[in-house]
Amino acid sequence: MVGKRDKTPQLNFFSTPLVQFIDLERPICKLAHQIDWEKVEKDFSAYYSKLGAPSIPIRKMVGLIILKQLFNLSDEEVVEQWLENPYWQYFCGETVFQKKYPFDPSDFVHFRKRIGKEGAEKILKLSIDLFGNTVRDRGVKIDTTVQEKNVTFPTDTKLHVKIIRKCQKIANENGIVLRQSYTRTIPGLMMVQRFRKHPKSRKKAHAAARKIKTIAGRLVRELDRKLPDELHAQYNDQLKLFKKILAQKRGSKNKIYSLHEPAVQCIAKGKDHKPYEFGNKSSFVVTSDSGIIVGALAFRNNPYDGHTLIKQLQQVHRLWDKLPDYAVVDRGYKGRNKVLGTEIVIPRKLPETATEYQRKTLRKRCRNRAGIEPVIGHLKSDYRLGRNFLKGVPGDAINTILAAAAFNIRKWITIQVDFFFSFWNLVFQLIFNPKISPLKMSF
């Protein structure tokens, strides 16, 4: 059941209202006034049942999700800082300073599962609506990047050792006696792996790696035989995953790179410093002039960039309520000229019959496309896109969309601050230099 907040709170004799000691001109307070919280509560109430105990108020949950992404904090850190920050409490709808934690950090997990990708898109649309009708760009820039998952660099030996540990754990939990546990054998074999690149130790290290794989397969088969029928169904998916990892080879398709994140893909973007990245492909749409993100999607199975355009532009239409006249992309999208009525602009050589105006227009648009690269860089370094800690395929989609929403909100806050300083700079110049005409000055 939706938890309701008190819209007309009674003043407390022992508590001072937040509005009496905070600065309401701070950007975070202006943001709280700009967001239509009643609409947010109405939109997100559809994800709650009409029965049961009251939940945490929607404004508090959505507000903390925004703050977490905006300041690049973990679930635990954002709850800790909320307790100490009266501005954050005001942003989340509190009227007096709270001295207790708002909820357990694990409630973030349940809330993200509740709203899913659709709810995350509502937060992204909220961030786009902050700019109102000021976003009138005719064109957009589209590019893809890799959102890396929180997994270790995968090697066959690492995966085989993890399979052994998992099999030992399953056996211990269910009272299954293994013929041999290999508890003391594995550390010795792993010790040999340290020097596998040394010419004198290479042969011995490869033999140890083969031995580890043999032990892993032996334990999986023994566990498969000895598990009772009532437990076999419970662990069937895990055993299938173990067998698939043990069967895969260097050239196998759809390889498993992580036990806890089987959907992770190996993506090669051609970077010298990082030839391979392990995660998923994410696509972003940025307006050509204002630089606002109006679309963000996560894709599975590393699709060809050109095949992502239809879904990406459909999302832009949902969130932005219109389609751009043109979209500028790089040569990775080659093969697409028009999608859903939007012209796809790719750097190319124009025919000799092209006019000078056409050449200049194409050159200008292609130069402008490079502006999406620093946007992706900021998403990775500042808004949690660089390392995705959310679990599974739904976590990929949610983290991608929330990173884009946080970027837009930060841009809106920056505009408010810049306007404030520009305005007072103009006032001071008019006071101390009255010879300057106001008509010749600009913000």
Image (spheres, rainbow, N blue to C red):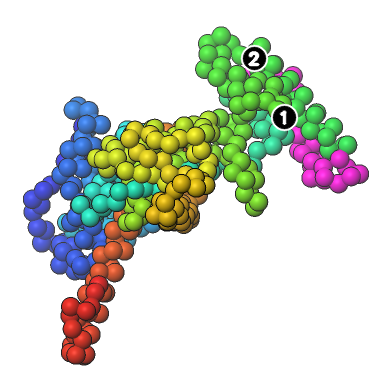
Q: Indicate the amino acid at tag 2.
A: Asp
**Residue corresponding to mark 2:** 224
**Residue corresponding to mark 1:** 250
Q: What residue appears at the point 88 percent right and 37 percent down from the top-left corner?
A: 203
Is residue 358 visible from the viewing direction of this image?
yes
Q: Return the disc, 1 or 2, that comes first in the chain's sequence.
A: 2
Nearest the viewer among 418 and 149 is 418
Disc 2 residue crowd, few under 14, some 14–19, many 20+, Cα 10 Å? some
Q: Is residue 80 left or right of residue 230?
A: left
**Residue 191 at what x, y percent from top left?**
79, 42
**Residue 408 at what x, y percent from top left?**
33, 53
Q: Indicate the amino acid at tag 1.
A: Arg
Q: Quadrant of residue 166?
A: top right
The quarter of the image holding the N terminus is top left
Per the rendered image, the range of residues in magenta is 176-202
Residue 193 counted in the magenta span: yes
